[in-house]
Amino acid sequence: MRLPLIFLGCFLLNNGHAQLADTVRYSVVNNGKITGKQTSLTRAANDHYYHYEYNDRGRGPSINTHIRTSEKGMIVLQEISGVDYFKNKVQEKFEVKNGRAAWKINLK
């Protein structure tokens, strides 16, 4: 029962600031407290940006993602950067060019 309540608690918040029509903000709720957020932004029909973070006793990820899709909805570019749960650097890139897919990841 607790898990559905956590997911139910992750709903859109309007914090009083003007939002673009293409921006959606969510809150991460744990034990009734807001511990993080996710922001989804669409700048163009095929250009999407996401930011996700939460704090768990000083730990937790902070991730930025940029996704570009083709006119058919296929991902042609995905860039991920930020830090993981233990604050280790995260840097990934997936790209499709000239019919070839390439993925680069930097992990420690």
Image: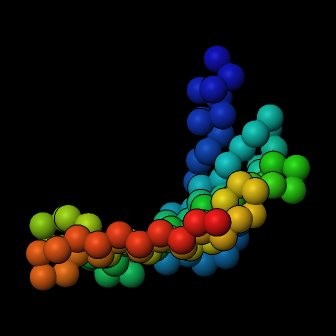
Front in this rendered view, residue 108 or 14: 108
- Please name the residue shown 79% across and 38% down the image: 32
The quarter of the picture where residue 13 lies is: bottom right
Position of the N terminus, as image quadrant, is top right
x, y percent for residue 86: 75, 56
x, y percent for residue 30: 76, 39
Q: Is residue 91 above or below residue 30?
A: below
- Please name the residue shown 47% across and 69% down the image: 105
Q: Is residue 36 shown to the viewer in this render? A: no
Front in this rendered view, residue 86 or 68: 86
x, y percent for residue 71: 14, 73
The residue positioned farthest toward the right in the image shown:
57
Q: How is the image coloured?
A: rainbow
- Please name the residue shown 59% across and 26% down the image: 4
Q: Is residue 46 shown to the viewer in this render? A: yes
- Along the horizontal axis of the image, is 80 left or right of 78? right
- Along the horizontal axis of the image, is 4 left or right of 65? right
